Amino acid sequence: MARGSATLASIQRDHERSLGGVRQMSIAVHLSSRGIAALALAALVLTTACSGAGTPAASASQAAGSPVSGGTLTIPIVADPTLNPWSPNAFVESIFPNRVLFDGLTKPGKDLAPAPDLAASWETSADGLAWTFKLRSGVKWSDGQPFTAADVAFTFNDVVLKKELAANHAGDYAALKSVTVVDPLTARFDLSRPFAALPSYLAYNSGLLPKHVLSADPLKTVSFNKGVPVSTGPYKVEKYNAGQNVTLVRNENYFGPKPYLDKVVFSVVPDPNTQIAQALAGDIGLMLLDDKAAIARVKSASNLVVAPRPLVQYYWLALNQTDTRFTDVRVRQAFVQAIDRQAIIKAVEQGYGSIANTAISPALKAYYDPSHASKYPYDPAKAKSLLAAAGWTAGPDGVLVKDGKPFRFTMDVGQKGPLEPVNALIQQDLKKVGVVADLNTMEWNSYIQKVVVRREYTASVNWWIYPSDPDVFPYYHSSAAGKGFNIPGFKDAKLDEILVRGQATSDLEKRKAVYKELQTYMADNLPYLFLWYPEEIDVISSSLQGVPALGLRDSMHYIGEWWLAKK
Amino acid sequence: MVVGEEVGKFLALRLASGALVVLFTSALTFFFVNLAPGGPSSIMNMTATPEQREALVRAMGLDRPVAERYVTWLGGVVRGDLGTSLTSDQPVAALIGERLPNTLTLAGAALGLSCLVGIPMGILQALRRNTWLDHLLSLLSAIGLAVPVFWLGIVLILVFAVSLHVLPSAGLTSVSDGSLGDRLAHLVLPTLALATTILPTVVRFMRSSLLEVLGAEYMRTAQAKGLAARVVLGRHGLPNALIPVLSAVGALVPRLLGGTVVTEAVFGWPGMGRLALDAANGRDYPLVTGIAVVVAAIAVATTVVVDLAYTRLDPRVRLS
């Protein structure tokens, strides 16, 4: 008996040992995973070179022809979506389907100005505190029930404004007091302060929910969020296959023209390299290319078109204003000129982006002031002289010193998108002017908790994507310092005044003037260090036509116009 | 009779200790995942305001102490309720139940393939020890161990789906097709990728185990008795050599389940591995704990089965 168990134990020990050896090997492999990833890329290039050598594809999207009905379009998303635009669990994977399914009162126009969607028209009162929306008549939900102002009131009063529900981006509607049903086709938004950007915000992930379905539990009804929701868009859900895909078919009750595509499939493909491989294989008709390093590969494929699109997004470096070293504007101006932003755009965006010196993206054509783009060219010598003027002199080891203390701090780095290489590039650039930045890299949720929630950071790079409107109040107003979206904690009375004035101005020409002033003030004072405006790269099957030249999220509002050319 | 009694006692003991292991796993997972910095994704969202975060913390009950939440969770488990996912509001048990069969299919196929290929390969290597064939197969095993699954997966997709167009690139089935043939075609590439995580180990165990047996005295005795080489190997060699391999395969099951995390992500396979990855990234505390418990239970069950099988194969091994 004893002997038996001894044999068993010794056998198991042997296995442990050899498994341990294997484990060590796999750790070694993980350590060099970057090299391995490069190998995988090389393999991709090889196979595309074999399979995709052919005519250049760039002109394919311009192929003429009149739209035809039919076909299935597959679009990849990274996880199972939550089909409810207001659910706090509706993350990036949910935005595409939600924008197709749920119409808002407005939608982003092709010039990004708010355009009518479920609202036919709107007007504001003289004091800017009441907005009246006339609804489109004859609109039905996908279950045949009529859409009315009661649904608008329900969505805002009972979902967005219900604090305990913590609805997704409810913070965008901080100025909203309540929505009143004037008549079945008229809804009035009453505000506590003027909010000229309201129609733009209503076009931004603000789809309306059906009162008759969700009044019991607006955000957690699983049969809706993870099943077949009732919606008003051109397509409705046919089937939700968890972990696999969500298939959409035409909504026969849709108020607009009949969409061309028979079917739209949002396919769950978590791995970005697999998404690219699927596009190369022709299994995917349209995708957003996050990893711009893959552009060359995709370009070489004859069945795909690479389309750069403008985005309402900018990357920034936040310097915590509780650290007195960063309250001197000369230090901020020195940093922004010490950083070779063009090199960063080239390295991580493959050149698809432009230098930012304000928060207003060039995608907002009506408001963007291009005169600031060249304000801070890469100039390390200028940076050094500005730092010297601020009292920072070179110490014996080349590191700048002031009051006996070296200019050294930690930059917290979240593992997401291009943030790791960007931080490494900034670190090198700062070193050249005698500033030491130590990088502290961490997983994304940990990063958000440390930097965004607790504000326990000194310097950090991140980005903002915001609604297509120059009203950036939540990210810059002093009331948001230390807790809201004002990450650097920048407080400035003049900046506050311009932001408030912008919100109170609804006349387009006057608004343009206010936001021109805002851009000048931002570029001079650098509340955040603005880095660059990225462009989005969409990969589109050469047979897919009619996709407008907008960011893919905004394009989703025009899915009814997309069509597949017959092969 | 005695044997039956022994088995019953053994089972009761092992199941009791297994239950303890699972309980311990659940406690460790629950506390560690709660200790991990950051919180559920909906709270750790860039665009959530402080008020929203507070409301969510309250709504999810995360304002209560971890120990208290664990006890509540444990109370639910006793009633067969593994809790509710924080990111999808669906019952954890339902989510796992939906994904587990897909993972078992994939892991089972990979395990089957590894044994079908690995055992003959190991035997061949042992019998042709130190020949060029042995060295070649050893080299292949080493390569198999060294190649990371995510890389191999992408290469397989590029070769078989993109270039050759013979197999589907990813997913469980095609959107418009769900036939058995379609399902099997989708299973091929992920099975190949996942099998590489354990196949080389099976080969190595088979080889070394058979070599050890071949040198044993009873083998020489059998040969001396004048038995044919085939009979010596088939009746005395292989049965004895396979016993440690069986135990190795049992020990490989947890690694196989770990391997599904990467394989399922690369191939868009709707299994539990991917669910675990999403849950961990999103700090979905109940879901992470639920999956850990299920995996622990599978691992415990596997060892019990392997140990029972041992007694059948090797009369020297007793249950105690």
Image (tube, helix red, strand yellow):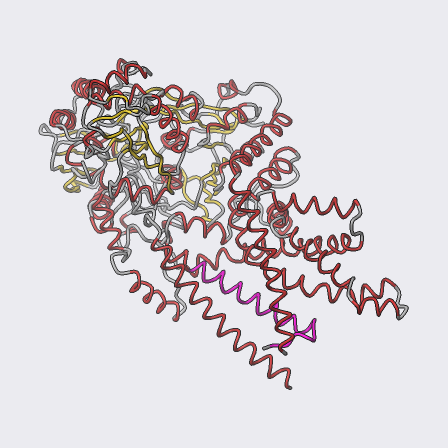
Picture coordinates of residue B171, whole percent (x, y): 54, 45
In-front residue for pair B14/A198: B14
From the viewer's perspective, is A474 left or right of B11? left
Identify the residue shown where x is 61% and y is 57%. B108
Tell me if I can see residue A313 in this picture. Answer: no
Identify the residue shown where x is 12% and y is 30%. A128
Residue A497 on the magenta segment: no
Tell me if I can see residue A84 in this picture. Answer: yes
From the viewer's perspective, is B49 left or right of B261? left
**Can you say whether B312 is above or below A165 in the image?**
below
Q: Quadrant of residue A48?
A: top right
**Can you say whether A525 is above or below B227 in the image?**
above
What residue range appears in magenta?
B290-319
**Can you say whether B320 is above or below B162 in the image?**
below
Picture coordinates of residue A206, whole percent (x, y): 28, 38
Identify the residue shown where x is 51% and y is 24%. A305
Q: Quadrant of the N terminus of chain B?
A: bottom right
In-front residue for pair B236/B184: B236
- Dominant secondary structure of the magenta stretch? helix
Picture coordinates of residue B103, whole percent (x, y): 54, 55
Residue furthest to the left: A127
Residue furthest to the bottom: B1
In-front residue for pair A92/A406: A406
In-front residue for pair A454/A533: A454
